[in-house]
Image (tube, grey):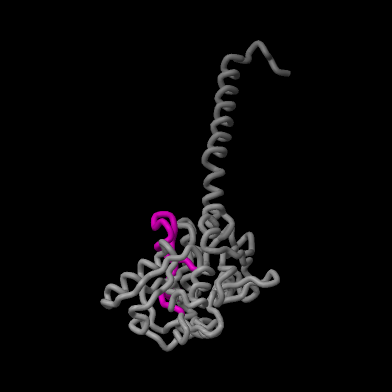
Amino acid sequence: MIDFKRLDFLKLFKIGVRILIGVIVLVLLIVFFGAPAQEAHQSRFDALLERGVLLVGVCGDMPKLGTEKNGKITGLEADLAQQIAKNIFGSAGMPDLIPYDSRTKAYALDNGEVDLLLCRSTSAEFDQDEYIFSDPYFTDAVGFMARGGENMSLEDISGKKVACIYGSDAQDAFVQEVKARKLTLEVYEYASYPEAVEALKKGVVSAFAEDTLVLFKYLPEGFGVSLDRFAPQDLRVVALKEDAELMDRVQQTLKALEETGGLDVLRKKWGL
């Protein structure tokens, strides 16, 4: 039988308070330190592995790189995305391809719509402090289209009228190259690719200068794209800076394809 007279209730109370405080402190430590530690343990790459699908933004309207037809995207970028997915998930790995164009791709990574952007992108388009880039998978350049253009050099259109897209980087590069070669050309500016191509077909201009991938997209029958090209632009895979582990897998894939000649095979497959 407990002798309540001999119990020191004040002492018991103090012990109880200490125990309660200890429990509260332990709970707070778990809440404020335990959860973040567990979250940090699972990296973004681990989360991707757990998800089991690689989300890749690719061109959906650019022949040779990526075009969408009947819900299926084909092109160099789609093939590369498949190789990257296999590197991550094994031979059965397949990416989820999401089509973009030059305007809609801008916030795809920031919005979490994709893990990688493999969409005719150069490092100059993105903030170097927020994004990381792969080695180039293809190098585009500025050229021109004209009748018989595949056999022509810039000197062959000297003194003629040439269409350019107003305010474009390609126009700036074209004008600089013309000046560097000390040629004389008359530049006609247009607001869109179809307008420039229409002017070329009607004979208003003798050539249309632009990035060669764009030229191939709009190339009309009876015209060719020059082999004389300048102002090279390296196309790279883009990821958020915190996805360095994922970019390492991209680099591994590209390096392996370069060493085995697989990348050249894919470029030739798509006429690049």
Q: Is residue 20 left or right of residue 142?
A: right
Which residue, as the protein is rendered here, is positioned at the far right?
Answer: 1
| Viewer can see residue 27 | yes
Q: Quadrant of the N terminus?
A: top right
Residue at coordinates 54% horizontally, 75% vertically from top-left? 218
Residue 136 is covered by the magenta coloring: yes
Closest to the observer: 70 or 4?
A: 70
| Viewer can see residue 262 | no
- Residue 74 against residue 55 in the figure, above or below: below
Residue at coordinates 41% horizontally, 71% vertically from top-left? 234
Residue 241 is covered by the magenta coloring: no
Residue at coordinates 63% horizontally, 66% vertically from top-left? 96
**Residue 177 horizontal/vertical position (percent):** 32, 74
Which residue, as the protein is rendered here, is positioned at the far top?
Answer: 5
**Residue 268 horizontal/vertical position (percent):** 52, 85
Residue at coordinates 59% horizontally, 26% vertically from top-left? 20
Q: Which residues are magenta?
A: 120-145
Closest to the observer: 231 or 253?
A: 231
